[in-house]
Amino acid sequence: MPDDSLAATFEARLDKLAALAVRVGLNLRPGQELVMTAPVEALPLVRRIATHAYQAGATLVTPLIGDDEVALARYRHAAPEAFDTAPGWLFQGMAEAFRGGAARLAVVGESPTLLAQQDPEKVARANRARSIAYRPALELITSFAINWNLVPAATPGWAKEVFPGLPEAEAVARLWDAIFAACRVDVADPVAEWAAHNARLHARTTYLNDKDFLELRYRGPGTDLVIGLADGHLWAGGAEPAKNGIVCNPNIPTEEVFTTPHRLRVDGTVRSTKPLAYQGTLIEDIRVTFAEGRIVEANAAKGAEVLRKVLETDEGAARLGEVALVPHSSPISASGLLFRNTLFDENAASHIALGQAYTTCLRDSAGVPMERLAERGANASLIHIDWMIGSGALDIDGVTKDGAVEPLMRGGEFVGV
């Protein structure tokens, strides 16, 4: 017979996660609409999020549900020319909703290897078409014009990648346990716990903004890298105010502080420390060389062709748009799990991101054209892809504007922060 107490505990934790997404992640305001995307397996969480959103005063919750089997059907049966098509009408509608004041929430839980056996050329074409069509909505997100949030849900496809040796039901249950722990749901008052966590992240951003480093120098196995920071860069992390005045936590979970690198001032070599799950493909052991900000050599032990296609998306795809610092002792890293999901793995290790910069990480950037921000170092691209380079063997120094070199991280941990 099923254990009703365990079921009740799960339902209570799931409801806490939903409340957290609405109250802390989005900080949804009365009168706002909510546009939500999610995999079909996440419907129980989606329904609870909708309930909490309406209780918070939402006027309308619009869920957009995806399905892995439908996605695979395209690759198995669609005509070759179909892979240059994307639902621009949908993304234009989302952008219109955001311009009208709607909030954005994405429930993530896709299988990291869904498209691993599909033609990389088709995957690259479909991703490029989607990136172009999604740009009107993405720009409103990356510029922080709206309050938005990502929150996870355990799905069978994802769970079997994290716990490959377990039966499906047990793997899903274990993944839910890991999600609840990482999202700080397993405490008496998750909202209060997130307030304290945000305060710790803000203390780090204050320290880094006061330092105003010119560049960061990375040393670790396979990594010897210098990342120049954009002129007038700002560090951010945890809860931040969107341009609509609403303070939100874009990522649940989150352990990072991040800023904008200079698109022309990155030099050296760097090696990934965790696999990158990108659009259903796993890219492992990434090794790249930068010269004057651009990747001039790229390799990967697995998924190399997909990586190369990504780098060809546009001129900015081979340059950096984000640099983020995460202590190796973060709870997600300490769990010992490889989640094969960027929302989690990027919060287990320091990372960098190819592509579009977060222009809000630049001082006095509101209303400034992208061409002017590019002069200060901000990168523009159709993509924004985080990949992990941190570990317990990574050292990072900060270089001040007068040339002084100061230890920032040793063995993956912050020094004096």
Image (cartoon, rainbow, N blue to C red):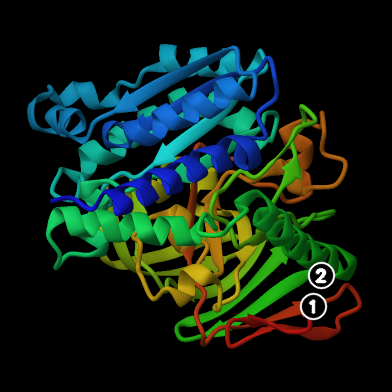
Q: For this view, does 258 lie left or right of residue 364?
A: left
Q: In terms of secondary structure, where does tag 2 sit?
A: loop
Amino acid type of disc 1? Val
Where does the image place residue 161, in percent across and percent down from the top left?
Answer: 23, 59
- Residue drawn at (17%, 64%) of the image: 164
User: Splitting the image into 4 quarters, where does residue 25 fall?
Assistant: top right
How many numbered discs? Answer: 2
Q: Which residue is mark 2?
A: 213
Q: For this view, does 302 lie left or right of residue 240?
A: left
- Residue drawn at (12%, 29%) of the image: 73
Where does the image place residue 367, in percent across and percent down from the top left?
Answer: 82, 28
- Residue drawn at (12%, 59%) of the image: 167
The CA distance from mark 1 to mark 2 is 5 Å
Number of other residues with Cα within 10 Å of mark 2, as a class: few under 14, some 14 to 19, many 20 or more: many
What number is the disc on residue 270? Answer: none
Q: Which is nearer the eye, 179 or 7?
A: 7
Amino acid type of disc 2? Phe
Image quarter in which the C terminus is found: bottom right
User: Splitting the image into 4 quarters, where does residue 87 fall?
Assistant: top left
Confirm or deny contact between disc 1 and disc 2 (CB under 8 A). yes
- Residue drawn at (62%, 53%) of the image: 189
Q: Which residue is mark 1?
A: 399
Q: Which is nearer the eye, 386 or 232?
A: 386
Where does the image place residue 190, in percent across and percent down from the top left?
Answer: 60, 52
Q: For this view, does 92 lie left or right of residue 69?
A: right
Where does the image place residue 274, in percent across and percent down from the top left?
Answer: 39, 69
Q: For this view, does 293 lie left or right of residue 43?
A: right
Mark positioned earlier in the residue sequence (1 or 2)? 2
